Amino acid sequence: MSWDHVWIDVNIATMDSKVAAPYGAITNAAIAVKNGQIAWLGPRSELPDFDVLATPVYRGYQKWLTPGLIDAHTHLVYAGNRANEFEMRLQGASYQDIANAGGGIISTVKACREADEAELFNLARKRLNALAKEGVTTVEIKSGYGLDTATELKMLRVARELGKHHHVEVQTTFLGAHAIAAEYKHNPDAYVDLVINDMLPAVMKENLADAVDVFCEGIAFNLEQTERVLQAAKRAGLPIKLHAEQLSNIGASELAAKLGALSVDHIEFLDEAGVKAISQSGTCAVLLPGAFYFLRETKLPPIDLLRQYQVPMVIASDINPGSSPICSTLLMLNMACTLFRLTPEEALKGVTINAAKALGIEHKVGSLAIGKQADFCLWDIHSPAELAYAYGVNPCEQVIKSGRIIQQ
Ligand SMILES: N=CN[C@@H](CCC(=O)O)C(=O)O
Ligand SMILES: [Zn+2]
């Protein structure tokens, strides 16, 4: 047997539902990598003979190995910050008040239109480095702070460039329908026309997006406008997702289900009819505890209903300057448990296999099984629950991306 690398004496949280144990765990295990893929994994005692002189072998000392983490919802390409709005909220203004007064997303739009690609790239790279240090190997990045064709393209190009220059794999999402651009304040439908007829074709031409998202909400796009954008995305052959039911329930998730969306994200105000609809369409529920925490929301997402209808729950950071300026996927695991009462196992599924489902890449990443991409992390922990339990001392010891050992 000839392999590129082998790890022995590790405990593996495979997160593979075919392994019938919590976390899909295999204890006293080994894993072998060849050509960027997992060539073998199983109990150490069953490890086939291999050429020990020719193969680098790493000893895990019974530490835990998990799939590389996947952050399936971020807005990490942006310029400026909104600390002033943070202060305004502490003086009593609400997130909606600020948005309605022309602040919020629109104020980040001004900063992003002014920034050039190099500036956006450098700011975003720091955020991506922070995630990578915590074991993130795949990240989704949205546009949506341009709201004109040139700036939306600029954001997506920066996201694509990040993916080329960093070991973390980047999935891009076109979110031109994030807010109504100030220039179209009095004619939102004309802005939707711009998104569909100008931005989307330009995005497609440069192959800049892996998916399309819309913020479907009272302060953003209504159901009809949202459907127009999503139908256009589908015609262009892109998967779709929605910012849905964050501040109110306008039926966004039922629309997402009808159109076969990959995910609905936020969903604090999702009701049983919506949960039922997304369970039937196989749409994932992306929970964003960072935004819930930072906006001091009080309405909890319907976790029990999501469990009851067996909707895959995803946990993501939602990194953005307005509602979640928190650059830590690991902290989200802790928040998912403390704020949303997820179990640590549910939380870990939310940043591994279920996050992969929300991005439509579960055939490739998200769990550890023979034939999958060799994306995994070695953690200095005694049980996988520790990843959600404690925060502040980074337990990530080693990151392997596509079979390559990343030194950081
Ligand atoms: N809800 C909409 N979009 C972002 C917030 C964007 C912002 O406030 O800048 C979110 O996911 O929370
Ligand atoms: Zn978001």
Image (cartoon, rainbow, N blue to C red):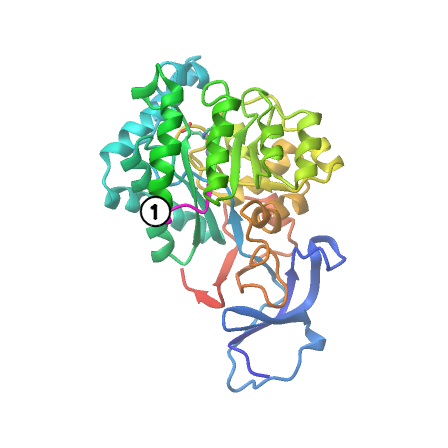
Q: Residue at x 57, y 50 (%)?
A: 356
Image location (x, y in percent) of residue 258: 62, 33
**Foreground of the two, 247 or 149:** 149
| Left or right side of 383 for 401 | left
* Residue 189 seen: yes
Location of residue 185 (image quadrant): top left
Q: Residue at x 54, y 40 (%)?
A: 332
Compared to residue 61, the image places residue 201 above or below, namely above
Which region shows up in magenta? 207-211
Task: Determine whether the residue tagged by mark 1 lies in a helix, strand or loop.
Answer: helix
| Left or right side of 8 for 331 | left
* Residue 294 seen: no
**Foreground of the two, 355 or 382:** 355
**Foreground of the two, 12 or 244:** 244
Residue occupied by mark 1:
205
| Left or right side of 349 for 309 | right
Image location (x, y in percent) of residue 58: 54, 73
Q: Residue at x 57, y 38 (%)?
A: 261
Image location (x, y in percent) of residue 167: 41, 58
Compared to residue 307, the image places residue 404 above or below, namely below
Amino acid type at mark 1: Lys
Q: Residue at x 50, y 85 (%)?
A: 54
Location of residue 92 (image quadrant): top left
Image location (x, y in percent) of residue 204: 38, 45
Quadrant of the image containing the N terminus: bottom right
